[in-house]
C-alpha cells in the first residue's frame, strides 16, 4: 500500500513537470519508428532488449499494435537504441551460428535454387557461406516459414558476388556442373536468368523462363529448349495467336520481299504469301526462325499485342 501511494505521488509529480510516466502519442509513434528501423536492419526482439534493457516482449507488442503507449523508462531505452545489422559467429565446435530476426525466406530460397540450377554445387556454395553442404541442400529442398536475417544477408551477398560468373570460372568440373544443373532442373529450380532484382524477393512473382511465359510462344520455347513447363505456360493456349498483317508490316519495314524473307529463313516459295494472306499460320518452330531473321519478337506478330 505504501509503495502504491509513493508511486502515485511520483506519477503526479512527473505529470506536473510535463513528463508523465506514460509517454504521449507522439512519443510512442517516435519509439515505434525506431523499433521498425531496427527490425528492417534484421535485429531480433531479444537483440533489441539486450541493447536497451526493455522487456523482449515490448517490440513485438508495438509491432502488433497490442499497446498504444509505454512507460517512460521503456521509451528512454528504446530511443537509445542504435540499429545494427546482426552478425553470424562461430561456435567453439566450429559451426557457424546465425542470428537476427526471422524474415521471409522467399528470396533466399530462390537465390540458392537459381545458383544450383546454373551448376554451382552445394559444397561450393556451402564453403562460400561457411555452412555445410547439408545446410545448403536443406534450404533449397524445403522452403521454410522463415530464415534468420544473417542467413538472408549472407545468401544475398553471395548471389551478388557470383553475378555474371559461371561455375567454370572457379575450376568446377563439367561433370559436377552437369550433375548439379540436371538435378536442379528436374526439381523445377529456376536459374538466375529467370529472375531480376525486382522479382526475386516478391512472394507473388513467378519466374520468367522464356521471356514469353503465359503465352503459346512460351510453351513453344519450353518444348524447343527442353525446359519443363512452368505453371503459367501449362495454362497457356497450345496454339499461337498469329497476325499475318503484322508480319507483312514487319517484313516491309525491314525492306524485304516475300521471297527474300523465304530465302533468308530457308522456306519454300509461297509460305510467307499464305501466312500474310491469313490462309494459315506458321508452325511455332518455323516462326521462331522467321523472327530471328527479322530480328523481332513474338509480340511483334501476335494478334494479342
Image (tube, rainbow, N blue to C red):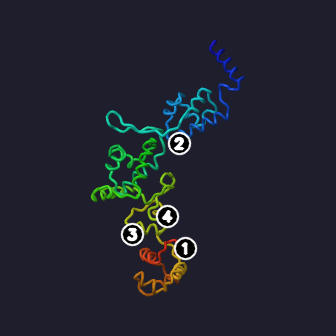
Q: Which of pointers 3 and 4 lies earlier in the amino acid sequence? A: 4
Left or right of 150? Residue 6 is: right
Residue at the farthest right position: 16
Marks 1, 2: nearer the viewer: 2
State the separation of the CA atoms marked 3 and 1.
22 Å
Q: 268 or 46: nearer the eye?
A: 46
State the separation of the CA atoms marked 3 and 4.
16 Å
Q: Secondary structure at mark 2?
A: helix
Residue at position x 55%, y 73% in the image: 303
Q: Secondary structure at mark 1?
A: loop
- The residue beneath circle 4 is 214
Q: Residues within 10 Å of mark 3 (few under 14, many from 20)?
A: few
Q: Secondary structure at mark 3?
A: helix
Q: Secondary structure at mark 4?
A: loop
Image location (x, y in percent) of residue 304: 55, 71
Mark identifier at residue 224? 3
Residue at the farthest top position: 2
- The residue beneath circle 2 is 40
Mark identifier at residue 303? 1
Amino acid at each position: 500500500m505504501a509503495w502504491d501511494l509513493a508511486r502515485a505521488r511520483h506519477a503526479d509529480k512527473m505529470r506536473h513537470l510535463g513528463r508523465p510516466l506514460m509517454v504521449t502519442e507522439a512519443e510512442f509513434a517516435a519509439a515505434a519508428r525506431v523499433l521498425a528501423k531496427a527490425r528492417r536492419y534484421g535485429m531480433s526482439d531479444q537483440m533489441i532488449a539486450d541493447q536497451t534493457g526493455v522487456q523482449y516482449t515490448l517490440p513485438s507488442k508495438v509491432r502488433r499494435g497490442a499497446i498504444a503507449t509505454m512507460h517512460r523508462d521503456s521509451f528512454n531505452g528504446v530511443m537509445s537504441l542504435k540499429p545494427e545489422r546482426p552478425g553470424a559467429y562461430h561456435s567453439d565446435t566450429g559451426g557457424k551460428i546465425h542470428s537476427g530476426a526471422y524474415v521471409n525466406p522467399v528470396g533466399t530460397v530462390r537465390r540458392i535454387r537459381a545458383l544450383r540450377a546454373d551448376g554451382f554445387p552445394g559444397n561450393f556454395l556451402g564453403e562460400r557461406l561457411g555452412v555445410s553442404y547439408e545446410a545448403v541442400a536443406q534450404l533449397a529442398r524445403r522452403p521454410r516459414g522463415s530464415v534468420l536475417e544473417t542467413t538472408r544477408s549472407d545468401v544475398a551477398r553471395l548471389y551478388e558476388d557470383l553475378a555474371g560468373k559461371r561455375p567454370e570460372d572457379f575450376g568446377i568440373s563439367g561433370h559436377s556442373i552437369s550433375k548439379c544443373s540436371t538435378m536442379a532442373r528436374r526439381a523445377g529450380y529456376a536459374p538466375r536468368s529467370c529472375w531480376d532484382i525486382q522479382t526475386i524477393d516478391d512472394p507473388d512473382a513467378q519466374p520468367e523462363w522464356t521471356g514469353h511465359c503465359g503465352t503459346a510462344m512460351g510453351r513453344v520455347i519450353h518444348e524447343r529448349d527442353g525446359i519443363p513447363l512452368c505453371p503459367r505456360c501449362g495454362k497457356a493456349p497450345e496454339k499461337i495467336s498469329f497476325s499475318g498483317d503484322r508480319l507483312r508490316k514487319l517484313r516491309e519495314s525491314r525492306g524485304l520481299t516475300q521471297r527474300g524473307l523465304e530465302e533468308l529463313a530457308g522456306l519454300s516459295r509461297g509460305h510467307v504469301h499464305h501466312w500474310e494472306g491469313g490462309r494459315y499460320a506458321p508452325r511455332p518452330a518455323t516462326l521462331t526462325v522467321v523472327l530471328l531473321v527479322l530480328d523481332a519478337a513474338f509480340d511483334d506478330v501476335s494478334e494479342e499485342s
